[in-house]
Image (cartoon, rainbow, N blue to C red):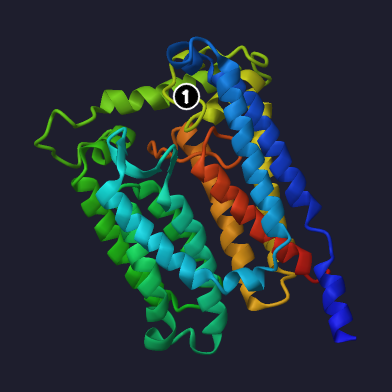
Amino acid sequence: MAKAATASLTRRPADRAVIWAVLVLSAAGVLAVYSAVSFLAETKAGGDTERFLFRHLLRVGLALGAAGALSLLDYRKLARFSKVAMVVSLALLVAVQILGVVTNGAQRWLELGPISFQPSDVAKVALIVHVSVLLSKKQEYITSLGRGFVPLLIWIVPTVLLIGMEDLSTAAVLSATLGVMLFVGRVRVLHMGAVALAGLILAIGFLASSPQRAARLEAWTGIEMFSSNDDAVAITSQDENYQADQARIAIAMGGITGLGPGKSVQRDFLPAPYNDFILAIIAEEYGLVGALLVLMVFVWILARGFLRVARGAPDPLGLFLAIGLTTAVVLGGFINAMVTCGLLPVTGLAMPFVSYGGTSMLATGAMVGVLLNVSRHAKTT
C-alpha cells in the first residue's frame, strides 16, 4: 500500500501555475527580444533580425526542454550527484580563471569548440542543490558551528569567491539566495552574520580592485569612493549613467500603456537592450501596465514556490530545494528590474526567461525543472 501511495504521488502533475508563469515570461521575452535586437541585427548581421530571433527561440526551447526533462526526474535521485556536480563546477570555475575568454572587460566565459558558456551559471545551480542536500542531512546539529555550519562553508566559500572574482553581481545574488536557505534551515543568525560581514569586506576589496566595478557603484551613488591609477580601463560615471539614463527615458516614453509593439526608440541607444535592460523595452512598448504584469508573474512564482511547493514538500530536501530555486529565479528578475529603474547600480544580470541569453537561460530552465519535480511530490495544501 505504501508503494502504491508513493507511486501515485510521483504521477501527480507538476504545478501548472509555475508552468504557465514560465510560458508567459518566455512569450514576453520573445516579443521584447525580437524588437530589441533590431539595432544589433543592423550592425552585426546586415539587418537579419530573424537570425537573432531564431537563436533566442532555440535557447528558449532548450531551457523549456531542460525544465520538462528535469521535472520528470526524481529530485532525490538527482541530489545524489550533487557533490560530483560541485567538484565539476569548481573545476570549471578554476579553468575560466586560466583559460577563460575576456568579454567586456570580464573573464567569465569558457569556449569548447563552437560552444561558449559561463561556468558561474552551472556552479550556481550545483551549489543550491548541494547546500539543500547538506542542510537536510545536518538538521539535527545544524546550530553547531563545527558539525553543521563549517561543512556548508567548505563548499559555499570557494564557489562564491571564484564567481565573485569576475562576476560580483552573480556572486551577490547567489549569496543572498543561500542566506535565505540557511535562515530557513535554522542556521544560527550569529554564524550567518559573521560570514556576511566577512563577505561584505571582501566585496569592498573586489570593488576597489576593479575600476569597472567601482565606476558602476560611484555612478549610482554619485560619490567618488575608490581611486584608480589606470585611466585607460576606468569607466567614467558618465558612461555608466548613460545606460541608466536611457533606461529611464524608455520607461518615461512608454507611459501607462506604451508606444506599441515594435515601436521602441530607445533600443537604438540602450547598450544591450535585449539583455540587461529588456524590461526598459517592455515598459516603452507596453507601458507601465506591461512592465508590472511581467513583475507580477515573478511575484506569482514566488508565492507558488514558497506557499505551495515548499510548504507541501514531503521532506526537508524538497523544502530547501524549493526555497533556494524559487529565490534564485525571482531574485534575478527583481534585481534586473531594479537596475532598469535605477534602484541598483548596473549589474549585467539577465531577467530569467525574458532576456536574450544562453547559459543563464539553460540554467534557469534547469532550476525550474527541479522545482517542478518537487511540486510533483508535494502534499496537498
Horizontal and vertical percent position of residue 131 = 50, 71
Image: 92 above or below 129: above
- Quadrant in the picture for the N terminus: bottom right
- Label tally: 1
Image: 67 above or below 54: below
Report the residue that reaches farthest toward the left: 229
Residues 211 and 165: in front is: 165
Residues 90 and 151: in front is: 90
Q: Quadrant of residue 262?
A: top right
Horizontal and vertical percent position of residue 282 = 61, 25
Horizontal and vertical percent position of residue 287 = 64, 22
Pointer 1 residue? 247
Image: 101 above or below 76: above
Amino acid carrying label 1: it is Ala
Evaluate whether residue 80 shows in this view.
yes
Secondary structure category for the residue under label 1: helix
- Give the residue displayed 61% in from the left and 40% down from the top: 353
- Give the residue displayed 66% in from the left and 68% down from the top: 75
- Give the residue displayed 21% in from the left and 43% down from the top: 210
Q: Quadrant of residue 155?
A: bottom left
- Please state if 298 lies on the left or on the right of 112 as rendered: right
Report the residue that reaches farthest toward the front: 113
Evaluate whether residue 307 shows in this view.
no
Horizontal and vertical percent position of residue 295 = 63, 39
- Please state if 360 lies on the left or on the right of 375 as rendered: left
- Quadrant in the picture for the C terminus: bottom right
Q: Residues within 10 Å of mark 1 (few under 14, many from 20)?
A: many
- Please state if 299 lies on the left or on the right of 276 as rendered: right
